[in-house]
Image (cartoon, rainbow, N blue to C red):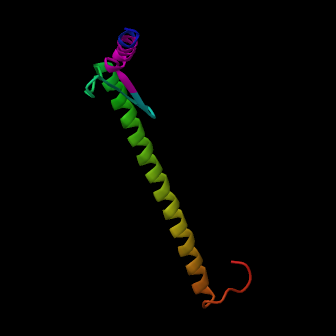
Amino acid sequence: MLRAVLIAACLAVAMPCFAQQVRVIKGDIEHVYGPSGELLDDGDLQARNQRAWEHMQAENQLAIARLQVKVEIEYLRLNRAIARMGNYGGWVIGPP
């Protein structure tokens, strides 16, 4: 009898975990999953996720543009150094 009560109590305690929603947060993007793994995002959450995704894409594009500018500056600096070396016949005399 005690064993049956213990099993029933364990099942009663464990049952709510099957009916829960799971909230997954990764950075600024958030999703809500239901009991069978289905996506339960409402319209507001989808809109917030869309804005967060667009913001991340804009930041990535900005980082790429900054890197391209750095590469271009380095290219111009090296080009100028090569041009200066050409003025001296390949030998550097004194400071550039």
Q: What secondary structure do most residues of the magenta stretch adopt?
A: helix
Q: Give 92 or 23, whichever is nearer the viewer.
A: 23
Residue at 41% from the left image edge and 36% from the top image edge: 55
Q: Give 31 or 51, whichever is nearer the viewer.
A: 31
Task: Name the side, left or right, on which 70 lies relative to 48.
Answer: right
For the record, the magenta segment spans 6-23
Q: Is residue 12 magenta?
A: yes
Residue 9 in the image: above or below residue 40: above
> Where is residue 81, by image quadrant?
bottom right
Q: Give 11 or 35, whichever is nearer the viewer.
A: 11
> Where is residue 82, by image quadrant?
bottom right
Q: Is residue 3 magenta?
A: no
Residue 58 in the image: above or below residue 10: below
Task: Name the side, left or right, on which 8 lies relative to 79.
Answer: left
Residue at 37% from the left image edge and 36% from the top image edge: 53
**Which quarter of the rendered picture does the N terminus lie within?**
top left
Spot occupied by residue 91 in the image (x, y as percentages of width and height): 65, 89
Residue at 44% from the left image edge and 32% from the top image edge: 28
Spot occupied by residue 34 in the image (x, y as percentages of width and height): 29, 22
